[in-house]
């Protein structure tokens, strides 16, 4: 008997590399990257810098490492970092901002993930012997815990103006920045031109098995390279990581539109189900978050009932379920997911 098909909507990190990526790994020209001698890594870094409109780039193992390397490259220990209260750096990176970087995070609330420039301005306290020196403002694009919402180029520019006026750097955790660019149908440079430096992930919607890129000025990247080494991130024949990244930048960006269409289709289906609610204004890219509080059920039990129907998902916060579309999720999977949600919700309402 064939096993039941599993529709995995937990994250776009579950994507597997394409056959072309696997072939690129197999045939990659390799060298020692710590010595700067891996030609495949060098090509990927040059492509990433050009794509983002910056001087240089650095391949690292993960988004978390990219953020930590960037935090440490932008600041000195004991300084203050202004960031959004639901940001990935603040929530999901094991407190590395304090434990390793020695920085004080200063979280600010927002309604849709975009910091209000007035709030940023108010958070920059005057020089005083009692206060840590502010050094950096961090933004996240798209914003994970706000449901994949986009921080627009105009919003980034407004935040940048405040940072520049106070001599602060502006850093963007751009793990899914290509989702934002594709959704608004603009060049990704429109998002990067007002930030000093940023990172983006290869291993999420772009379908690579591993890796992220840190991008900025040549001076910044030279510092980041040394900090990467301190963190144990210096890699040798890293072209096997870089090779699928080259394929991703060449061929995997435009297809993100399919993920966004599937997410909207999923959200529209969920919106018709009694007992769950979805805020359509937040369905901007490849994430759909919906509230199940009216079903009066524990989150884990709801997820387990979905899993029995062959659907995998995660909770974003209490009573809020998150589903993420990605390569490998097709229209028929969306229809099956909606049907499974309707079935589970109906059973719970009756019960």
Image (spheres, helix red, strand yellow):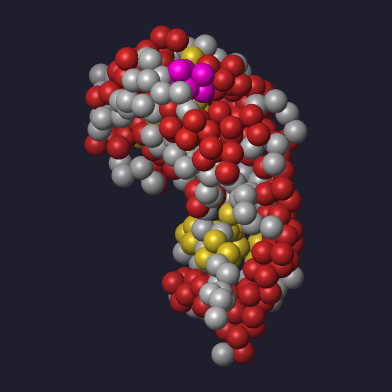
Q: Position of residue 144 (x, y in %)?
A: 53, 46
Picture quarter with the N terminus: bottom right
The answer to if 159 sits in the magenta stretch is no
The answer to if 43 sits in the magenta stretch is yes
108 to 146, vertically: above or below: above
Q: Residue furthest top?
A: 219
264 to 132, vertically: above or below: below
336 to 148, vertically: above or below: below
Magenta residues span: 39-45
Q: Position of residue 208 (x, y in %)?
A: 51, 40
Q: Residue furthest front?
A: 27
Is most of the magenta stretch helix, strand or loop? helix
Q: Is residue 88 left or right of residue 79?
A: right
327 to 253, vertically: above or below: below
Q: Closer to the camera, 236 or 207? A: 236
Instruction: Residue at 36% x, 42% y: name it.
Output: 93
Picture quarter with the C terminus: bottom right
Location of residue 272 by image quarter: bottom right
Q: Is residue 126 left or right of residue 248?
A: left
Q: Is residue 306 visible?
A: no
Q: Closer to the camera, 181 or 95? A: 181
Instruction: Residue at 52% x, 11% y: name it.
Output: 55
Q: Is residue 11 visible?
A: yes
Q: Position of residue 185 (x, y in %)?
A: 75, 33
Instruction: Residue at 69% x, 41% y: name it.
Output: 255
Location of residue 154 by image quarter: top right
């Amino acid at each position: 008997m064939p096993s039941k098909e599993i529709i995995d909507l937990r994250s776009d990190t579950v994507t597997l590399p394409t056959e072309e990526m696997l072939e690129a790994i197999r045939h990659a020209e390799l060298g020692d990257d710590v010595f700067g001698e891996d030609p495949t890594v060098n090509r990927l870094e040059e492509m990433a810098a050009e794509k983002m409109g910056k001087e240089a780039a650095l391949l690292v193992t993960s988004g978390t490492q990219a953020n930590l390397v960037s935090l440490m490259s932008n600041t000195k220990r004991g300084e203050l970092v202004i960031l959004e209260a639901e940001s990935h750096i603040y929530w999901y990176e094991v407190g590395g901002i304090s434990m390793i970087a020695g920085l004080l995070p200063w979280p600010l609330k927002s309604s849709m993930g975009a910091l209000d420039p007035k709030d940023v301005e108010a958070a920059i306290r005057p020089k005083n012997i009692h206060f840590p020196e502010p050094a950096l403002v961090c933004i996240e694009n798209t914003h994970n815990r706000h449901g994949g919402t986009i921080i627009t180029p105009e919003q980034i520019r407004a935040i940048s103006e405040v940072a520049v006026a106070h001599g602060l750097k502006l850093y963007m955790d751009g793990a899914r920045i290509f989702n934002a660019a594709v959704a608004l149908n603009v060049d990704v440079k429109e998002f990067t031109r007002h930030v000093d430096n940023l990172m983006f992930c290869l291993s999420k919607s772009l379908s690579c098995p591993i890796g992220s890129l840190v991008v900025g000025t040549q001076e910044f990247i030279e510092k980041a390279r040394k900090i990467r080494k301190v963190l144990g991130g210096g890699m040798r024949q890293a072209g096997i990581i870089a090779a699928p990244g080259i394929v991703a930048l060449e061929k995997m960006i435009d297809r993100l539109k399919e993920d966004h269409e599937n997410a909207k289709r999923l959200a529209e289906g969920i919106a018709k189900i009694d007992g769950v609610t979805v805020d359509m204004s937040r369905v901007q890219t490849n994430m759909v978050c919906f509230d199940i509080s009216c079903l009066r059920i524990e989150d884990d039990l709801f997820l387990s009932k979905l899993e029995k129907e062959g659907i995998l998902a995660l909770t974003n916060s209490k009573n809020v379920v998150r589903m993420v579309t990605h390569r490998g999720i097709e229209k028929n999977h969306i229809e099956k997911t909606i049907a499974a949600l309707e079935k589970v919700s109906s059973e719970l309402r009756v019960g």
